[in-house]
Image (cartoon, helix red, strand yellow):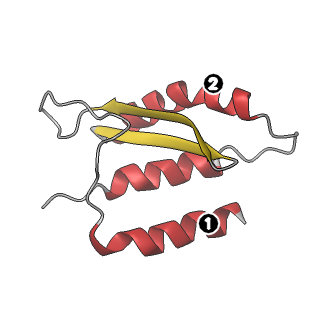
């Protein structure tokens, strides 16, 4: 069983790095995601991750990056399921706490 914890942590980093003193502009933030994720994958060694942005109850961005397993050809897409085991609750709570 392989856990994809680094991908979830990467999402937390992206979310925490988006806090700004200026008014929040959803379109501008989304426009920066592709470059931020590419940089994160390159600097961290994470083989792949999926990112989704939900705003107002609607998915406004969903995209996969990289591959599912390092060295394998299968790409990550917006519908890739990552195994989190029992880590989803503490990670989710940490993400919510950071946003609050």
Q: Where in the figure is residue 63, as x and y percent of width and height?
A: 43, 32
Q: Residue at x 27, y 38 (%)?
A: 47
The disc, 1 or 2, on the residue closer to the chain's N-terminal end is 2
The image shows residue 93, relative to residue 34, as above or below, that is below
SS of the residue at dot 2?
Answer: helix
Give percent across and percent down for residue 37: 47, 33
The answer to whether residue 95 is left or right of residue 1 is right
Question: Depth check: 54 or 21 in front?
Answer: 54
Badge 1 density bin: few <14, some 14–19, many ≥20, Cα 10 Å: few
Q: Quadrant of residue 31?
A: top right
Q: Are marks 1 and 2 in contact (CB under 8 Å)?
A: no
Q: Is residue 62 above or below residue 97?
A: above
Mark 2 surroundings: few (<14), some (14-19) or many (≥20) residues within 10 A: few
Q: Name, please, the residue furthest toward the front.
A: 57
Please tell me whether residue 92 is drawn above or below residue 20 in the rendered image: below
Circle on res. 52:
none
Going 36% across and 53% down the picture, which residue do you hit?
A: 6
| Numbered marks: total | 2
Task: Say the numbered circle drawn on residue 96.
Answer: 1
Residue at the image position 72 percent from the left and 27 percent from the top: 28
The kind of secondary structure element at disc 1 is: helix
Q: Between 6 and 43, which is closer to the camera in this rendering? A: 6
Tell me what residue is drawn at x 36 percent, y 41 percent.
Answer: 49
**Quadrant containing the N terminus in the rendered view:** bottom left
* Left-right relation of 91 to 16: left
Check the image and name the residue furthest to the right.
22
Residue 77 pos. (x, y %): 33, 33
Residue at the spot of label 2: 31
Could you tell me residue 60's position as x and y percent?
60, 35
The reply, left or right, for residue 56 in relation to residue 3 is right
Q: Is residue 63 above or below residue 81?
A: above
């Amino acid at each position: 069983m392989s856990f994809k914890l680094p991908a979830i942590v990467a999402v937390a980093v992206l979310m925490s790095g988006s806090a700004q003193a200026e008014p929040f502009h959803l379109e501008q933030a989304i426009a920066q995601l592709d470059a931020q994720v590419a940089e994160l994958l390159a600097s961290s060694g994470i083989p792949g991750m999926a990112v989704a942005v939900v705003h107002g109850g609607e998915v406004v961005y969903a995209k996969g990056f990289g591959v599912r397993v390092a060295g394998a050809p299968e790409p990550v897409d917006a519908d890739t399921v990552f195994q989190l085991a029992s880590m989803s609750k503490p990670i989710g709570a940490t993400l919510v706490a950071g946003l609050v």
